[in-house]
Image: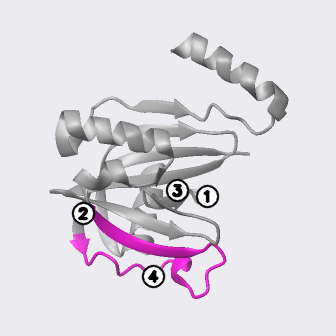
Amino acid sequence: MKRVSARAIIIEGDKIGLMYRKKTTHAFYCLPGGKQETGETLEQTVVREIKEEFGIDIVVIKKVYEFVSESAHQHFFLCRWVDGIFGTGQGEEFTVPSDKGYYEPRLINVEHLKELHILPKKIARQLRRDYERFGENLDNKVKVFYDDKPTTIPPKFQKFRRKSYKTKHA
């Protein structure tokens, strides 16, 4: 069963809210959010997660992206910060020590998106493009992206799948 999650894109002026994550082997940024709980809508999930992670209240404006992989289905929502102090989250990821690594909420200048290692990469690239083209309201169309490197296909056969994928969708 795929893990379903909801994530927020919070752009305020020239800043965007990102979560900096550091694990033992690597560091990266991601859009904040998390797993949908039983009985929650995706919108309720993202509101709850942002309160836990960033300590702020948000309103959901619209869904803008989906990212589907073999193990997860992530929904990305454009949101507006309406109240609270950024960085005061009390979520489980901030317990010391966290078994999932180090977490730090950060407000980053949108101009620096090109320089940062943000996951998933396809969403980060599209977010940069949409911000440059449409500004902080992004596009009105929901864009869906797929991880084209499934892990259940043996490595010796993956190169054939990638070729096929590029040919059909180039």
Task: Identify the residue at horizontal 51%, vertical 68% (top origin).
Answer: 21
- Provide the residue span drawn in magenta: 83-108
Tag 1: Cα neighbours inside 10 Å, few (<14), some, or many (≥20)?
A: few
Q: Decide: marks 2, 4 in contact (CB < 8 A)?
A: no
What residue is disc 2 on? 81
Amino acid type of the residue tagged 2 in the rendering? Trp
Q: Nearer the viewer, residue 74 or 48?
A: 74
Mark-to-mark CA distance, 2 and 4: 17 Å
Badge nearest the viewer, 1 or 4: 4
Task: Identify the residue at horizontal 58%, vertical 17% (top origin).
Answer: 166
Looking at this view, name the residue that lies furthest to the bottom.
96
- Label annotation for residue 56: none
Quadrant in which residue 37 is drawn: bottom right
Amino acid type of the residue tagged 4 in the rendering? Gln
Tag 4: Cα neighbours inside 10 Å, few (<14), some, or many (≥20)?
A: few
| Among the two numbered marks 1 and 4 on one chain, the one whose residue lies closer to the N terminus | 1
What residue is disc 4 on? 90
